[in-house]
Image: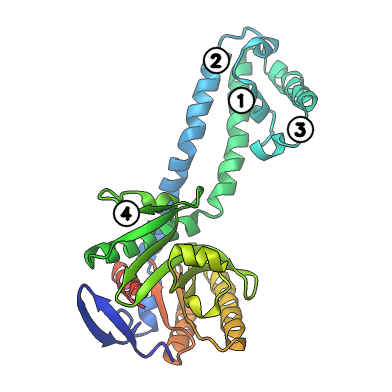
Amino acid sequence: MYGKSCKLNYGFSVFIMCSYRSHLQSSDDLITTYEAIRAGFVALALEKNRRATPYISEARILQEAASQAKTPQDLLKIKGIEMGLLTAAGLSDKSLAYLTPEDKVEAINGLIKNFLELAGTKFIEELVFRFLLTRGDTLGGSMRNVGGALAQRKLTRAIISTLTIAGISYHWQHLKTRKWVAMAIDDSEIELSLRGISWESENGNRTLVYNLTVPLFRSNVDICLFNLAPADLVASKFNIVDSYVALGELKGGIDPAGADEHWKTARTALLRIREAFSRVEHSPHSFFVGAAIERRMASEIWNQLENGTLSNAANLNQENQVASFSRWLCNL
């Protein structure tokens, strides 16, 4: 049962300790406090404002350019605002890929005839409002996954800090380019665009990858830790069963109303992981890290830790738990 003990390297000293007992003494330690919930909602609000900044800037540019028009029809004569007009017409960036030039002209003409002309002298305000309405919908879509993004950033920073404190160099994979980059002296904000991180310790090569579809059972797993270097991992196409050191679920949603559903999803995913690897006679570590953990959830998670079903768990809002969990993960 992996939950009872593990080898942990802190700096250059090695010692044996219970993997979760170093930061959890009972199920109560896993429960998310009211203060953490409040802080979580504030963090979401700040992130929403950060993500809205480009859209506000675009709206201001559109307003300034459109101010040259005396009538709604004059908007068609202004160069460089077609995308703004299409957005105000209610078309998302994705939808534009499916439209012909004629479709786009029709959409803009519909905007002018059905809405801007009816607004009279306030047609520019109407244009900007409708632009922001569509952009707001785009923002809302991106915010559905913001909890997970914030959770990944927080855990990533803790992992990077753990490696740095231990004097272990690392490489990190860019989310969009998929290129691996060596650590730099200034590593601030790399967690915003990081998909994976790799390092080498006395235990061998380790590579951590976020949001990976595991070939063994063809389902997405939030976090996978391998005992291979990035190049070997890519060459293997993630198919080497014995290369999986640990797999886990990371749930960053802070709303207590959705906490139980997040745990049910994670619990099902973790069960699928255990069953799939059991069939090929391999037993990697499994773990759960969550932002919103209610009392009943906490009891169930604790029981799984105690009976060895789970190797480790942590509440993402508790800094000491995240730090301890990161040390454990980095030293598997």
Q: Position of residue 58 (x, y in %)?
A: 52, 27
Disc 4 and disc 2: Cα gap in Å?
Answer: 43 Å
- At a point 58% along the width and 21% down the height, the residue shown is 125
Q: Are marks 2 and 3 in contact (CB under 8 Å)?
A: no
Mark 1 surroundings: few (<14), some (14-19) or many (≥20) residues within 10 A: many
Does residue 185 appear left or right of residue 182 in this picture?
left
Task: Tell me the tag on residue 183.
Answer: 4
Residue annotated with mark 2: 65
Q: Secondary structure at mark 3?
A: loop
Query: Earlier along the polypeptide chain: callout 4 or callout 1?
Result: 1
Disc 2 and disc 3: Cα gap in Å?
Answer: 25 Å
What amino acid does circle 3 point to? Leu
What amino acid does circle 4 point to? Met
Disc 3 and disc 1: Cα gap in Å?
Answer: 16 Å
Q: Quadrant of residue 237?
A: bottom right
Residue annotated with mark 1: 84
Residue 60: tell me if it is visible: yes
Task: Tell me the tag on residue 99.
Answer: 3
- At a point 29% along the width and 80% down the height, the residue shown is 8
Q: Secondary structure at mark 2?
A: helix
Where does the N terminus fall, quadrant-wise?
A: bottom left
Q: Quadrant of residue 216?
A: bottom right
Q: Position of residue 32 (x, y in %)?
A: 40, 70
Mark 3 surroundings: few (<14), some (14-19) or many (≥20) residues within 10 A: few
Disc 2 and disc 1: Cα gap in Å?
Answer: 10 Å
- Asked if 223 appears above or below 65 in the picture, the reply is below
Query: Earlier along the polypeptide chain: callout 3 or callout 1?
Result: 1
Q: Position of residue 166 (x, y in %)?
A: 23, 68
- At a point 50% along the width and 48% down the height, the residue shown is 177
What amino acid does circle 1 point to? Gly
